[in-house]
Image (tube, grey):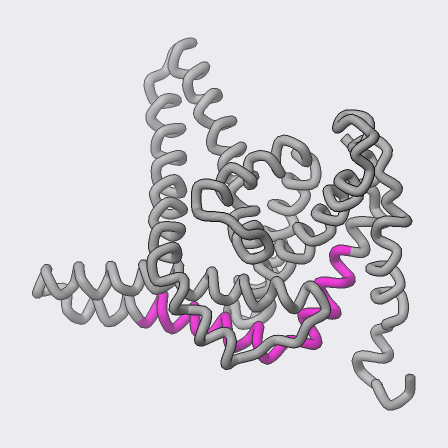
Amino acid sequence: MPLICYSPRMKGLLIRKAFYDGWDSVLFLLLGNILLFVVAFGGFALAHLTAPTFGIFLTILAIAILLLGVVLLSVSDELARVSAFQPFSLKRFFLSMKKYLLLGPLYILIFIFFLVLFPLAVYWYFSLGGLLGTVLGLIMFWISLIFYLAFQWFLPVKSQLEGNFVKALKKCFIIFFDNPGFSLFMLLYSLVILVLSMIPFLLLPGISGILLAQNEAFRLLMRKYDWMEEHPELDFATARKNVPWDEVLSEEYDAVDSRSLKGLIFPWRD
């Protein structure tokens, strides 16, 4: 495992770049979060109003959940472009929703299924008591953790790489097993963003901020694999341990180091 992947410098680059890109695209982050909020809570509220009519209640709830997946994938697509130093486009964002009318619902259904299933399975096995229950509970806990660590890469993988749903899912686990430490860092970093977002009621940086950070992180990791492809004379094990990260990420460092907090607040003074 390339140790520099988990060095404070690379983490600092990721956090700073995500912050600067988020600042430049704050309107899109806000729009994305508002849209996610409207779909999720608005859909659930409307479903609650129609609760006496079970069929209508279930239909509205299902539509809200499925539409949530479409919005998440579309937001991630646009933020992947932001992470690559490209401006966001509202027109492109709304047009991109069409291509995720099938993939978006599939993504959100799998996510919700395992989000509910894994905690219930862990609780059930531990509730059995005894050595067997404890062992099975621990096994299920680690399976759950591995799934969450790997699946967090799905949206940036789908936004930045070509491939169908199954290929994207496979790549998520490949990324995790090759970068477990960095994957753990990203999960914790995303949780920190989520907690901080509670103060402004998830409006900023919110879920969009998490998607931006994930796309930033995945883009940095892809620079590693690009370098490895450029050096086929090295076997995989040797190459992954000898990635010259300062050289590989030099453009990213230059772009980020050229900016400052003063420049964000008082751009006319730069």
> Is 140 on the left-hand or right-hand side of 172?
left
Instruction: Please name the predominant secondary structure of the magenta segment in the image.
Output: helix
Say which of 212 and 198 sits in front.
212
Residue 29 highlighted magenta (yes or no): yes
Residue 6 in sight from this viewpoint = no
> Is 101 on the left-hand or right-hand side of 183?
left
Q: Is residue 163 above or below residue 141?
A: below
> Is 261 on the left-hand or right-hand side of 105?
right
Residue at image point 29% right, 68% down: 43
Q: Tell which residue pokes out farthest to the front in this image.
A: 233
> Is 151 on the left-hand or right-hand side of 189?
left
Q: Which picture quadrant has residue 171? A: top right
Q: Residue 131 at what x, y percent from top left?
A: 42, 9
Q: Which picture quadrant has residue 134? A: top left
Bounds of the magenta segment: 14-42
Q: Residue 129 at what x, y percent from top left?
A: 37, 15
Residue at image point 86% right, 90% down: 268
Which corner quadrant holds the N terminus? top right
Q: Residue 6 at what x, y percent from top left?
A: 78, 40
